[in-house]
Amino acid sequence: MGKATEKGEIIILIAEDDAGHALLIRKNLARYGIDNRVMHFVDGQKLLDFFIHPSPDGGDDVYDRDARYVLLLDIRMPKMDGIEVLRRIKSMDHLRDIPVIMVTTTEDPVDVERSFSSGCSGYVTKPINYKKLLEALEATGLFELPGR
């Protein structure tokens, strides 16, 4: 089972415009023993809205400043690309420490450099090598992964 560190459960946020890719990520994380709560956002703007604007109905999908999060972020998304989302997250004091792992189709060195210089914690290309994704999650210091 994927466990968080002593500070409590980690919520995994997936910002991915392709619902099939998001479902595949979720299924593979579970397959590797990571059973944390997962929230999916179809574009960068919806993710930022989650952090900035509380849900009007007060449901479970409200950002909790006391919770801990890790973000799996696609670069190529409608409305706002992942690098711009990353820059905005890292510019806000209350979000700056959220680990962000880019999960994207592009291996363009410019995108890789822009991602790391904007503050990402890791970079994994699609099709996803789940061993690399697990290593990136473990490198955040938030997970004690099975068999490690």
Image (cartoon, rainbow, N blue to C red):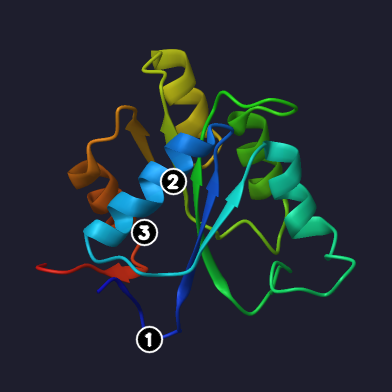
135 relative to 128, above or below: below
Please state if 13 lies on the left or on the right of 6 as rendered. right
- Please tell me the numbered disc located at residue 80: none
* Mark 3: secondary structure: loop
Residue beneath label 2, please?
Answer: 23
80 relative to 44, above or below: above
Give the amino acid type for the residue marked by disc 3 in the picture.
Thr
Asked if the residue under mark 1 is in contact with the one under mark 3, i.e. CB atoms within 8 Å, the reply is no
Closer to the chain start, of discs 3 and 2, is 2
Closest to the observer: 35 or 52? 35
* Mark 2: secondary structure: helix
Other residues around mark 1 within 10 Å, as few (<14) / some (14–19) / many (≥20): few
Quadrant for residue 112, please give it: top left
Please state if 60 lies on the left or on the right of 100 as rendered. right
Residue 49, given in percent of the width and then of the height, sits at: 79, 51
Residue 82, given in percent of the width and then of the height, sits at: 60, 32
In the rendered image, the quadrant that contains the C terminus is bottom left
Closer to the chain start, of discs 3 and 1, is 1
Q: CA distance from mark 3 to mark 2?
A: 22 Å
Answer whether residue 95 is visible to the viewer in this image. yes
Residue beneath label 3, please?
Answer: 140
Quadrant for residue 67, please give it: bottom right
Quadrant for residue 15, please give it: top right
Residue beneath label 1, please?
Answer: 6
Residue depicted at 74% across the width and 45% down the height = 46
Residue depicted at 24% across the width and 66% down the height = 33
Q: CA distance from mark 3 to mark 1?
A: 14 Å
Closest to the observer: 146 or 95? 146
Q: Nearer the viewer, mark 3 or mark 2?
A: 2
